[in-house]
Image (cartoon, helix red, strand yellow):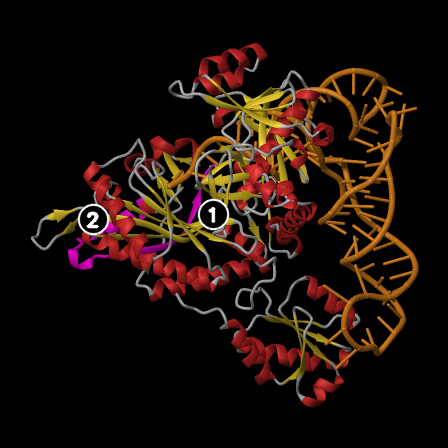
RNA sequence: GCUCGCAUAGCUCAGGCGGUAGAGCACUUCAUUGGUAAUGAAGAGGUCCUCGGUUCAACUCCGAGUGUGAGCACCA
């Protein structure tokens, strides 16, 4: 006689063991229709799971986050079934849920085409109409291997063979299709309301580049047609914000064949770049960093000493000149140590914070490049803090505070933190790793924010914190980092004189807030959809005449604003005012200042904001005050 | 780097059984001096990414290369 407690606290008693679906039915037919799965005592189960003891139960529908996952996972099965109906020779592999959807990887003799996707989608619809019941079964490992061998599914056999132990495995069947799966799944193929196959691309079997390539079909599935539509609109919006598109449209930068992965910055893009750099320079000065600059070309031997050549030789550009080999620097750290090494350092000099807007070049794999987001030539807001072990924690904590403040100034409020710890291949003793990981953990805990542990992902010389921000589209972008390094200073002979006059090796903290200017500006462009806030906008205001009678007045007004340090220009072309407004609105200029006879007479300008708001007539002083206030509205908290 | 697409005017894109191309916007000139998202007219603008092959003939078909897009792999 199971007693079921529902999320609202109410309880229901049943004579015999009941399934989740039966409970739903006993509550109401609407709920039964919507029920996809259940959560029994916190565990996600199928709707046909039998409950025989007292339990807490939540009926999962498409409104639950978990319900959506069930739909998507089941939709992957639905797609696999459709693919095998159309292409019986296609072999199934895996089909997990991902953000906003799912995919399934198939082994097939050729690539699927967009026409194939349409056909697959059609068969999926047919299977939905067939309303096949989804059934779960359990098999031993050996039985399962035999079954899939008979079906000729060699990848499934491999997957099952790689599952350790000889525990029983669960399988889900719908009609003729059966797949190894943990579940849970929807009750029947009629449960799908809205799905769409979005793309097809290659993907390596087991994520290993030395394996063969499979065909991955991506799809998305939602609880309702409306949600699917909203999702597709979100994709469209993201496409509109694409920094590559906006970069061209707003004349910010370009790329060309002769310099793959290296941006040509145009005046307006470079203006944004300079504003970001000016700001970072100010922040670094305020926070006791000493800015330096180091060579682009450094003899190869330094990279051999630092250990980078042996690991990254293929990704470094090199130059030969007069029988010497140089590498174009792929990073700044070895150079910063050279600066540290000049002159004798005392413990009194620590912590020493060196910063550089360091231009780096890396031969990134051709397929990995993506607009400004991943380039071969970039500038890091790099910094290295030389300190003692005791100083690590405070330095890391200060860095985190600085980073939050900078992100906030750029309009990013949410930061996601991850700690990557010792990888298999590493230098340094376990004791040193213990210590450095602990100091990073302490610093993370001190932020009061949640953070995620990523074991084994640290750099070979030390653990690192990775800081990602969330843009207004909800996308996570990794930008900042701070890494503890106990070994590179030693390799390159960095030392300081301690209190007891012994020579000691300093600890080095590698850190960057933005990561690279290129990437960060790409993120900014997409975050603001090109509507840069006034403090970053390449042109803050534009003065427009109505007729050429006002030209002199416009030029004088421009001059006055320029003298106050604003980025202003004029458009005195012989065009109608509506035409000019449209053109400059599309160029996303924050303020348009219109001057006609009225304004000349009153000594004002008519101010129009980017959104179209008419702020009325203002004098020079009034407009300066407005623009100053707008520019200062980012908090300058760093 | 791998798989599959794509590459035509400054931009966004059409196009064509294989017979060297077109629109809109932008640009130039002329007229127009007009008050908050497009004034009108005329004109100019292309080695159809590169190199090979097939062909009487290639922008079109085939191959290679380069760049680029989606995804995978990589990311000090």
Q: Quadrant of the C terminus of chain A?
A: bottom left
Does B71 sit left or right of A384 as displayed? right
Residue drawn where x is 33% and y is 37% of the image: A303
- Write down the residue under mark 2: A506
Question: Against A583, is A299 above or below?
Answer: above
Q: Chain of mark 1?
A: A
| One can see residue A407 in this view | yes
**What residue is shown at x 9% (from left), y 49% (from top)?**
A502
Q: Is residue A234 magenta?
A: no
Identify the secondary structure beneath mark 2: loop
- Residue A256: give its label: none
Where does the magenta region start and end? A334-363
Is residue A460 shown above or below B2? below
Secondary-structure class at tag 1: strand
Between A522 and A352, the residue placed more toward the observer is A522
Q: Residue A585 appears at what percent x and percent y? A: 69, 65
Q: Which residue is label 1 attached to?
A: A378
Nearer the camera: disc 2 or disc 1: 2
- Say which quarter of the image contains residue B13: top right
């Amino acid at each position: 006689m199971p007693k079921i407690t529902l999320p609202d606290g109410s309880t229901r008693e049943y004579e015999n063991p009941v399934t989740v679906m039966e409970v739903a039915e006993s509550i109401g037919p609407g709920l039964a229709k919507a029920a996809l799965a259940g959560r029994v005592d916190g565990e996600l189960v199928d709707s046909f799971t039998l409950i025989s003891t007292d339990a807490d139960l939540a009926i999962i529908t498409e409104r639950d986050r978990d319900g959506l996952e069930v739909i998507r996972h089941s939709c992957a099965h639905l797609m696999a079934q459709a693919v095998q109906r159309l292409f019986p020779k296609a072999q199934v592999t895996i089909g997990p849920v991902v953000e906003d959807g799912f995919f399934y990887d198939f082994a097939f003799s050729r690539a699927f085409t967009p026409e194939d996707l349409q056909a697959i989608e059609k068969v999926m619809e047919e299977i939905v109409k067939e309303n096949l019941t989804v059934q779960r079964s359990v098999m031993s490992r050996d039985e399962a291997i035999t079954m899939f061998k008979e079906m000729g599914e060699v990848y499934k056999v491999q997957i099952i063979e790689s599952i350790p132990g000889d525990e029983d495995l669960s399988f889900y069947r719908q009609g003729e299709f059966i797949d190894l799966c943990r579940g849970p799944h929807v009750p029947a193929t009629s449960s799908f309301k809205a799905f769409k196959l979005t793309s097809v691309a290659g993907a390596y079997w087991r994520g290993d580049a030395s394996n063969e390539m499979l065909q991955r079909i991506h799809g998305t599935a939602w609880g309702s047609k409306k949600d699917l539509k909203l999702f597709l609109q979100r994709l469209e919006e993201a496409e509109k914000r694409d920094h590559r598109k906006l970069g061209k449209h707003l004349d910010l930068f370009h790329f060309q064949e002769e310099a793959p992965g290296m941006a040509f910055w145009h005046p307006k893009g470079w203006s944004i770049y300079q504003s970001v750099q000016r700001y970072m320079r100010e922040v670094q000065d305020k926070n006791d960093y000493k800015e330096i600059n180091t060579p682009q070309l450094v003899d190869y031997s330094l990279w051999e000493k630092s250990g980078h050549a042996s690991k990254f030789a293929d990704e470094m550009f090199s130059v030969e000149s007069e029988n010497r080999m140089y590498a174009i620097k792929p990073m700044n750290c070895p150079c910063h140590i050279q600066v540290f090494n000049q002159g004798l350092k005392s413990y009194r000099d620590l912590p020493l914070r060196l910063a550089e807007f360091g231009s780096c070049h890396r031969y990134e794999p051709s397929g990995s490049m993506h607009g400004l987001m991943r380039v071969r030539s970039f500038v890091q807001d790099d910094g290295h803090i030389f300190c003692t072990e005791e100083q690590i924690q405070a330095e890391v904590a200060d860095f985190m505070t600085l980073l939050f403040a900078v992100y906030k100034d750029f309009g990013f409020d949410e930061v996601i933190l991850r700690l990557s710890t010792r990888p298999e291949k590493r230098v340094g003793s376990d004791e040193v790793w213990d210590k450095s990981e602990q100091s990073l953990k302490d610093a993370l805990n001190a932020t009061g924010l949640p953070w995620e542990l990523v074991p084994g992902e640290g750099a070979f010389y030390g653990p690192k914190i990775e800081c990602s921000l969330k843009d207004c589209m909800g996308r996570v972008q990794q930008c900042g980092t701070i890494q503890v390094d106990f070994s590179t200073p030693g390799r390159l002979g960095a030392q300081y004189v301690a209190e007891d006059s012994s020579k000691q090796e300093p600890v080095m903290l590698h850190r960057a807030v933005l990561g690279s200017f290129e990437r960060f500006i790409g993120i900014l462009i997409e975050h603001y959809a090109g509507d840069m806030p006034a403090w970053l906008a390449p042109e803050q205001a534009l003065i427009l005449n109505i007729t050429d009678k006002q030209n002199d007045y416009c030029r004088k007004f421009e001059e006055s604003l320029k003298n106050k340090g604003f980025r202003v220009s004029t458009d005195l072309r012989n065009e109608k005012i509506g035409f000019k407004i449209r053109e400059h609105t599309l160029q996303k200029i924050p303020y348009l200042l219109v001057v006609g006879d009225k304004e000349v007479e009153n000594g004002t300008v008519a101010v129009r904001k980017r959104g179209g708001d008419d702020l009325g007539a203002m004098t020079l002083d009034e407009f300066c005050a407005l623009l100053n206030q707008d520019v200062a509205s980012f908090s300058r908290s760093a």
